[in-house]
Amino acid sequence: MRTVPIQLPETVFSALRKNPEEFVQEMRIAAAVKWYELGEISQGKAAEIAGLTRAEFINALSRYRVDFMQYTTEELAEEIGNVD
């Protein structure tokens, strides 16, 4: 795992009423949810970025009101075609 330091103003922690560790965890989840919503990463990769299991990530998607099914019509047809 790689550590990436970022600098944030002290006031951001109070904005969400979280300590720095909780704030960083919430940032990871929010970024993963958004990237997943935009179709830039898979659900599994998003869960990994967020530091959650896939089940926990699906719950986070619900909390952010993002549909856990991010398939295009073509992708869904392909998935259905692969079911035997």
Image: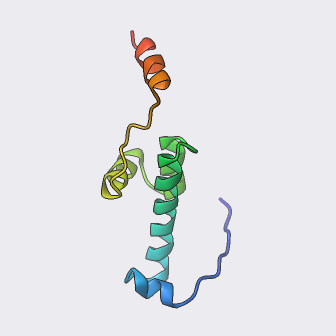
Going by the picture, which residue comes out furthest to the bottom? 10
Left or right: 47 in relation to 1: left
Q: Looking at the rendering, in which quadrant would you find the C terminus?
A: top left
Residue at 51% in and 72% down: 24
Measured along the vertical axis of the image, is residue 76 above or below residue 27?
Answer: above
Left or right: 3 in relation to 23: right
Measured along the vertical axis of the image, is residue 4 above or below residue 54?
Answer: below
Residue at 47% in and 68% down: 25
Where residue 50 appears, as percent x and y from the top left, is 49, 57
Residue at 54% in and 45% down: 45
Question: Which residue is at the front of the view, 24 or 12?
Answer: 12
Going by the picture, which residue comes out furthest to the front? 73
Measured along the vertical axis of the image, is residue 40 above or below residue 79?
Answer: below
Where residue 1 appears, as percent x and y from the top left, is 65, 59
Where residue 46 appears, as percent x and y from the top left, is 51, 49
Residue 81 sits in quarter = top left
Residue at 38% in and 37% down: 69
Where residue 36 appears, as percent x and y from the top left, is 50, 47
Residue 5 sits in quarter = bottom right
| Type of colouring | rainbow
